[in-house]
Structure formats: C-alpha cells, structure tokens
Amino acid sequence: MHSASSVSCGVHVCCKRRTEDVPRDVVLICCTELLAGFLKTGPKGSAQGNYGLMDLVAGLHWLHENLGAFGGDPDKLTLFGHGTGAALANFLAVSPMAKELVERVILLGGSALSPWALQRDPLMVKRRVSDQTGCPGDVEADDIAPCLRLRSLEELLAVHLDPPRFTSGFAPFVDGAVMPPPINQNFQPTASSSGLMPLVPGPGAEFANFGDRDLLLGLTSEEAWVSLTDDDLQKISWLTRMANDNSYFESGLSLILRVSN
C-alpha cells in the first residue's frame, strides 16, 4: 500500500526501490490511491470524499480478477503497508467493501488506530478548502466539487491546511460505507469467551475486527527518523539517557515511598 501521507511520492517512485529485495516466490504489486484523494466535497453524512480508499478497493477487485495471470493466488492476497500505507491496509481489511478480498495483513509502523490515521473533522478541512478557493456555500449541505473543478491546478495546490505535525489534512474519514461505523461495545466475559478481552475493547474496536484473517504487526528500527529535527533528536537523546539511568528512577521511587509513608 502506498504511504507518504497520501499526498506525495507516486507509486512509480515508492514501489521501485522495494522490488529488489522481494523473494522469488512472491508476486509484489504496488497499489496507490489518488493523492490527496480524501477531501470531503459532499454534504455531511455522505461517503463523498473517501475516493482514495475507493481507488484501492477497485485495485483489489482488479487483482482478484487478474492475479492468476502473473502466477499469483487471489485467495492468498496479503496487504502490506508501512506508516500511512499500514493504516490504509488496516482500513481495507475491515471495510465492508473490501474485507472479503483480503486474506492476510502486515502492518508496519502504523494502523487504523494511529492518532494520525483518521480525519476526525472532514468538514473542517472542507471549510478551509472552500474558503481558500473561493467556493462558498453551506459546508454541511453543499457539494463544492463543481466549483473546485473550475479552479486551476495552481490554485488548488496553493491551499494551506496547516494540520498538526506528523499529520495530513487529507485522510480517510468514517462514513459508514467505505469505512465501518463505530462499534459500541461493553465487553462482559462469558463462559464461551473464557474471559479473553477483545483486541481493542473500547473506541476503535471496528478497526481491529480482522475476523479469521492473519495479522502481522511490526516496527522499523528508525521509525519516522527522516521527519525528526535536531531538536527532536536532542530530546530523544535526553529521554534515552533518563530511561537507562537507574538512579533517576530510584530517586523518584524513594520520593514516592516517603510521601506514601
């Protein structure tokens, strides 16, 4: 699955450097979505705007129909992604529109539960795009797509969303169609459950509903390293020293014990 926060690095660039290390008995297919394809242009409550995920769903259908031609097995389709790509793979694995097309999932350095994976206020993004492109109207009721089509590429690229660091304003959002609706569950152990808790017992449980699919989770050794500044690295160095300094924790523990007594 394509990564790069869904806004940069075309698949011809991101995929090319991954093909050299693929085992001979694996068919690797890189699948991308429309970059910045998660702008909600339609009214509140509509799925209009999750086109990036719809692109990937269409790609999965194509693979099921054609994978045999490259020597692959469509019944053993594995979604594999890192960072944003991992979140997209997770979304597809639980999507009502795609989950039956997926057999295995590998998520590295991200998931649908990552704080940056979802756009929780797509109408806010729509409002900012509308204001900066001169496409007025009722944000909750109007479709701004016809107006945006009249704008030049330069005008669209000039839109500045100013999202929080490490996040993108353009991201999938819950629509109840492509993305599953929230699950309201209060887990109560039963005799049949043997007291086992679900993978995610609270909010976000719908994104951990993998059923009987195989799931592999992992991290890279230098997660997000390329995005860190010198100031970040200094803070990490300080935190690492503190974590490895037993005296730091011993002094804190002795203080807690004195207060407790």
Image (spheres, rainbow, N blue to C red):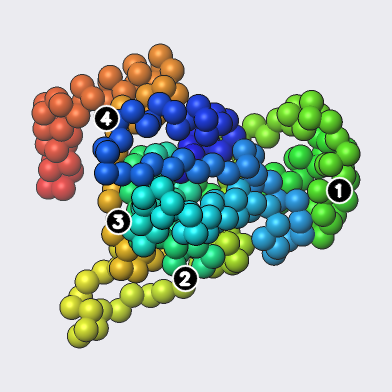
Q: Which residue position is annotated with label 1?
A: 146
Q: Which mark is first along the chain, 1 or 4?
A: 1
Residue drawn 20% across and 85% down? Answer: 191
N-terminal label among 4 and 3:
3
Q: Residues within 10 Å of mark 3 (few under 14, many from 20)?
A: some
Looking at the rendered structure, the secondary structure element under dot 3 is strand
Residue under numbered circle 3: 215
Q: To which residue does mark 4 refer?
A: 221
Asked if residue 110 is positioned above or below residue 243 in the image, the reply reads below
The reply, left or right, for residue 86 in relation to residue 248 is right
Q: Residues within 10 Å of mark 4 (few under 14, many from 20)?
A: few
Q: From the viewer's perspective, tell me whether residue 52 is left or right of residue 106.
A: right
Residue 112 in view in this figure: no
The residue labelled by disc 2 is 183
- Which picture quadrant has residue 16? top left
Q: Which amino acid type is shown beneath numbered disc 2?
A: Ile
Residue 253 shows in the view: yes
